[in-house]
Image (cartoon, rainbow, N blue to C red):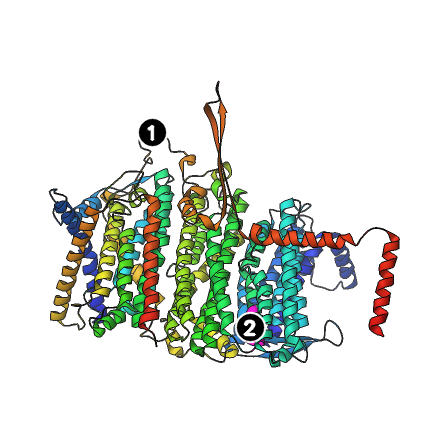
């Protein structure tokens, strides 16, 4: 039954993609319906009228768009149902689908881990399906055909769901490639811009390199096993060296998709150029699918977990978290900033997952569960708030045609609802109490603080350093999102577009983010249900759950024990309401002290202009100076001189370019190496037919020699 | 009963906060050979501000008028978590020390936003500086606090303080480091000299005051009160974590009265130290603050490492 739900989620997303193709076939549909009506004239007349009405020239595109997104939304709903269902029942369903090659049926397995990620995908897809119809309206049909967008969106979602269902390496890779390639076309959707094509190519390149690494990883496993099904891979006995090699390959492959430093560079290129609801899906969900792959590979298939792997994950995660947020802070482009912030959040998830591995390998399974819980809960939360923020960025872009933070300002008055939703997203991602981001960070800190149980001295001092880095990351994230919200929504408009902006008209476009914002708040106050669900995932995967289920009630959160740490968000909410309510009510009761509006204080010079406000680069200037080594900063001030001796300054231009260290230090050397290798290979290509015949002859001789 | 005492304690905390600020100012004036205002002057200021009509800039949005309430409530919530005159409170269980830092972050999130809201250069300047300083201070503070929580193996402040009390007077190197780190963070976070000067409105140096330049009336009163609360909070944290003796462990009348006297005495003493430090030290350049705070961070980390390496060795 649950598997039927899961299959229908996949099929619905697939069909929603196919349905979009009908956009250019209105004429054929009309012909078909006429044929149909002729053949079966006895049908209901209302129904017939409805169909004819829908096929009218004007209504058809609107109707089709809505139908596509309704199907997508249904797919999301089914995915949520299936995921929650399997987690509540702690089920493990296996199946075979005889698709693909005849002797290689697709093995399907739907367990709690898949179920949890189904839940993530489902919620995100549901929110996007509310948002989509309003958003895609702004695309010109002849330039950016809806059919392509919807086809690849459907395939992309189907691909992600299939990855979660796969139970053999072949099927896994097919689904993985479906996901990667479909998302490539989505990134390249607005391909008239060369920068977009370049970003899409970079994405495809890295996705394929990652896929190769994953294939090799599976290959290492499979060479020790009897086949390519996950069951066979689970049984394989690897020596620690080979297990380590398999782990590194999987880490490279899945880490490339998840966006871990230093293989993160495709994220800040690809996310800004994709349509916003697609970047929401890519950032909120696809990165999580990569995380799923890593968890499946390390915790499930590889068998025994080594603590060294945990250390690798911990270090890489810490680097990504810190690097991600520091780079995010310097970006003037909102979606680029959000992409770098995804690198940060994935880093946090990897960090906690590393902690979980370390505890697991050192024989503390309950603490390993705590870390696992924190990692998965943060993945869930990140899916919620990053989706929300990307959708919010889309709304802002839709209304102002602007993504540069330095050109915005004052939108809270023009777009109050968007502003409120975006604020909730910013508060969640800055991990403020009462919101979901805080709960997962709290759990992460609780995990790190249990380091006392370890025997290894190096680990005992490494983990607190990582916890310190996590604290710094959280504080920098708050600074970053204060900047984002403050510069976009507060102050005075910095551009004409922002001055003329108005609230989003389409209710669906508000409903999607509102759903996510509501969930952010809900799970910030009542994290219990989600944690119980993850607990069952841990029970199935790690064979261990948190000790006291009672402490995970709706009111209290006490993962270790009530004397060690506890957090009761509902009580905190009540306290906040009391404190806020009392002060609000008490201070405003006197009518003589009602608000009075007056001009802004301008030091008596008159006229506060928008250009006097702090800009994005000004806001982050102190941090840029403090952490100067982290970026490659190119800062120049050019002065236009005029006058008799060229001594009067006519204009001052300020240039600031901030570059990622990984380009000159990692990618460009690789690029040069590849070019050099190509030149070497090119030397044997003389263009002379006699030489080529000689090559063939020598090859033939060698082959004969080998064969004999 | 426990809840009643918790609420009473919080109320007392909130009401006493201006007194501490008045006392610090009084000590400072004496040390600088000036005539000191009454220690009750902050109460009079708050009352006066509350009776005035608040003037709000035309460009201000809803966030500007709501932020003071949010900031004040978040700070009050942080105060409920900290054991003031008695330990073993139910509020400490509902929110542990990480949540307390979270409340600080909450208040700190909205104050810079309010500064940015009006769209003047001052607001942006203050916000930018505040976020820079706080993003360096918050991890340092967490490091100092983690030293305590790992020693007591709990993040619940009540239990942690009880643990320190039960251990008796043990000189721990980690606690010395943590105390130093927390003190430096407290100086930075409450906007005292050498990081910020609460008594100046000089645009080149001000941080906190720049953000709240547009506030007036009850809004200003709330923000001022919140920053007084914050000063008191850090004072109580330092006093009760590192010198917890005297805090009430039972809920008898006598113990509570004794606890109240003890904390008032400790805070008065701390305030004198603060006043002396503020008189002796000159204000730092803004770009020296990072060194100050990274030193605090380093001290916190050293505290944590010395706990792990020296004290918890097995």
Q: Nearer the viewer, residue B15 or A596?
A: B15
Q: Is residue A387 above or below residue A165?
A: above
Label 2: few (<14), some (14–19) or many (≥20) C-alpha neighbours in 10 Å? many
Q: For marks 1 and 2, give the one nearer the viewer.
A: 2
Q: Could you say which disc has been placed on residue A298 in the image?
A: 2
Q: Are marks 1 and 2 on the same chain?
A: yes
Residue A646 appears in the figure: yes
Q: Name which of mark 1 and mark 2 comes first in the sequence.
A: 2
Q: Are marks 1 and 2 in contact (CB under 8 Å)?
A: no
Give the SS element for disc 1: loop
Main SS, magenta residues: helix
Q: Height in image: A565 above or below A633? A: below
Spatial separation of the CA atoms under disc 1 and disc 2 = 65 Å
Left or right: where does residue A673 sit relative to residue B226?
Answer: right
Q: Is residue A538 left or right of residue B63?
A: right
Q: Nearer the viewer, residue B199 or A236?
A: A236
Q: A296 or B40: nearer the eye? A: A296
In this view of the protein, which residue sits in the foreground, A351 or A544?
Answer: A351
Q: Position of residue B298 (x, y in %)?
A: 34, 58
How crowded pointer 1 is (Cα within 10 Å; few <14, some 14-19, many 20+) is rated as few
**Side of A448 where A672 appears, left or right:** right
Q: Look at 29% across and 52% down and name the residue there.
A: B189
Magenta residue check for A296: yes
Quarter containing the N terminus of chain B: bottom left
Q: Which residues are magenta?
A: A294-303
Q: Position of residue A303 (x, y in %)?
A: 56, 78
Q: Residue at x 68, y 45 (%)?
A: A143
What x and y, as percent, mark residue B262?
14, 64
Q: Residue furthest top?
A: A644
Quadrant of the rendered image containing residue A185: bottom right
- Residue occupying image coordinates x 45% and y 53%: A421
The residue to which callout 1 is attached is A605
């Amino acid at each position: 039954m649950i598997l039927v739900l899961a299959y229908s989620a996949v099929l619905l997303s697939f069909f929603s993609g196919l349905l979009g193709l009908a956009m250019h076939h209105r004429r054929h549909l009309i012909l078909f319906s006429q044929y149909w009506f002729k053949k079966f004239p006895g049908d209901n007349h209302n129904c017939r009228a409805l169909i004819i009405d829908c096929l009218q020239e004007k209504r058809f595109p609107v109707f089709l768009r809505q139908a596509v997104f309704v199907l997508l939304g249904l797919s999301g709903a089914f995915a949520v149902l299936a995921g929650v269902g399997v987690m509540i029942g702690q089920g493990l369903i296996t199946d075979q689908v005889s698709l693909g090659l005849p002797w290689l049926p697709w093995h399907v397995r739907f367990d709690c881990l898949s179920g949890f990620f189904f839940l993530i995908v489902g919620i995100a897809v549901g929110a996007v399906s509310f948002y989509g119809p309003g958003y895609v309206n702004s695309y010109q049909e002849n330039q950016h055909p809806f059919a392509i967008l919807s086809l690849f969106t459907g395939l992309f979602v189907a691909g992600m769901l299939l990855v979660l269902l796969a139970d053999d390496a072949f099927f896994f890779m097919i689904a993985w490639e479906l996901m990667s390639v479909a998302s490539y076309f989505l990134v390249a959707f607005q391909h008239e811009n060369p920068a977009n094509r370049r970003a899409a190519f970079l994405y495809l390149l890295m996705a394929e390199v990652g896929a190769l690494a994953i294939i090799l990883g599976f290959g290492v496993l499979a060479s020790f096993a009897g086949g390519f099904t996950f069951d066979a891979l689970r049984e394989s006995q690897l020596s620690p060296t080979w297990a380590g090699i398999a782990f590194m390959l999987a880490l490279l492959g899945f880490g490339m998709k998840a966006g871990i430093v230093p293989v993160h560079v495709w994220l800040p290129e690809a996310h800004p150029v994709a349509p916003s609801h697609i970047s929401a899906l890519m950032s909120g969900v696809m990165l999580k699918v990569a995380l799923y792959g890593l968890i499946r590979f390390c915790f499930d298939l590889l068998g025994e977990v080594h603590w060294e792997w945990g250390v690798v994950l911990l270090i890489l995660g810490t680097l990504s978290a810190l690097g991600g947020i520091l780079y995010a802070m310097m970006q003037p482009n909102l979606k680029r900033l959000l992409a770098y912030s995804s690198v940060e959040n994935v880093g946090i998830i990897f960090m906690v997952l590393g902690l979980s591995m370390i505890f697991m390998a050192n024989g503390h399974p309950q603490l390993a569960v705590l870390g696992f819980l924190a990692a998965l809960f943060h993945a869930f939360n990140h899916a919620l708030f990053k989706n929300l923020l990307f959708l919010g960025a889309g709304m802002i872009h839709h209304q102002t045609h602007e993504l540069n933070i330095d050109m915005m300002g004052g939108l809270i008055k023009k777009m109050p609802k968007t502003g409120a939703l975006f604020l909730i997203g910013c508060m969640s991602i800055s991990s403020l109490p009462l919101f979901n981001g805080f709960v997962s960070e709290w759990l992460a800190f609780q995990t790190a603080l249990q380091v006392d149980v370890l025997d290894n001295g190096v680990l005992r001092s490494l983990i607190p350093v990582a916890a310190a880095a996590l604290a710094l990351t959280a504080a920098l994230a708050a600074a970053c999102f204060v900047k984002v919200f403050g510069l976009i929504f507060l102050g005075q408009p910095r551009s004409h577009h922002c001055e003329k902006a108005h609230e989003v008209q389409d209710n669906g476009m508000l409903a999607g983010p509102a759903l996510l914002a509501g969930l952010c708040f809900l799970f910030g106050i009542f994290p219990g249900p989600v944690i119980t669900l993850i607990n069952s995932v841990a029970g199935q995967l790690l064979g261990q759950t948190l000790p006291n289920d009672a402490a995970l009630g709706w009111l209290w959160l006490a993962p270790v024990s009530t004397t060690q740490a506890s957090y009761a968000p509902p009580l905190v909410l009540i306290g906040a309401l009391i404190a806020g309510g009392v002060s609000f009510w008490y201070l405003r009761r006197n009518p003589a002290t009602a608000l009075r509006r007056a001009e802004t204080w301008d030091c008596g010079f008159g006229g506060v202009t928008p250009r006097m406000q702090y800009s994005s680069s000004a806001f982050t200037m102190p941090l840029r100076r403090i952490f100067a080594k982290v970026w490659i900063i190119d800062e120049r001030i050019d002065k236009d001189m005029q006058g008799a001796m060229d001594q009067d300054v006519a204009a001052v231009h300020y240039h600031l370019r901030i570059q990622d260290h990984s380009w000159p230090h990692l990618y460009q050397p690789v690029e040069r190496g590849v070019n050099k290798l190509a030149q070497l290979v090119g030397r044997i290509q003389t263009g002379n037919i006699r030489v080529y015949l000689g090559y063939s002859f020598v090859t033939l001789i060698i082959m004969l020699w080998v064969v004999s | 009963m426990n809840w009643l005492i918790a609420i009473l304690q919080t109320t007392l905390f909130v009401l006493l906060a201006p007194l501490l600020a008045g006392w610090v100012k009084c000590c400072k004036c004496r040390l600088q050979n000036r005539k000191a205002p009454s220690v009750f002057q902050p109460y009079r200021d708050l009352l006066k501000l509350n009776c005035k009509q608040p003037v709000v800039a035309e460009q201000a949005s809803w966030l500007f008028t709501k932020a003071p309430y949010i900031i004040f409530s978040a700070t009050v919530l942080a105060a409920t978590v900290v054991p003031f005159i008695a330990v073993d409170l139910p509020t400490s269980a509902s929110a542990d020390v990480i949540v307390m830092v979270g409340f600080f972050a909450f208040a700190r999130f909205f104050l810079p936003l309010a500064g940015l809201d009006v769209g003047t250069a001052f607001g942006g300047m203050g916000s930018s500086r505040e976020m820079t300083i706080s993003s360096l201070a918050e991890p340092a503070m967490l490091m100092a606090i983690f030293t305590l929580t790992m020693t007591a193996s709990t993040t619940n402040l009540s239990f942690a303080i009880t643990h320190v009390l039960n251990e008796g007077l043990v000189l721990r190197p980690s606690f010395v480091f943590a105390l130093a780190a927390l003190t430096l963070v407290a100086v930075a976070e409450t906007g005292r000299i050498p990081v910020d000067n609460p008594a100046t409105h000089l645009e080149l140096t001000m941080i906190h005051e720049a953000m709240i330049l547009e506030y007036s009336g009850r809004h200003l009163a709330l923000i001022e009160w919140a920053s007084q609360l914050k000063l008191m909070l850090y004072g109580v944290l330092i006093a009760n974590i590192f010198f917890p003796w005297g805090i009430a462990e039972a809920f008898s009348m006598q113990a509570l009265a004794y606890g109240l006297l003890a904390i008032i005495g400790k805070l008065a003493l701390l305030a004198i130290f603060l006043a002396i430090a503020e008189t002796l030290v000159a204000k730092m350049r803004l770009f020296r603050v990072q060194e100050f705070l990274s030193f605090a961070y380093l001290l916190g980390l050293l505290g944590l490492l010395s706990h792990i390496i020296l004290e918890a060795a097995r």
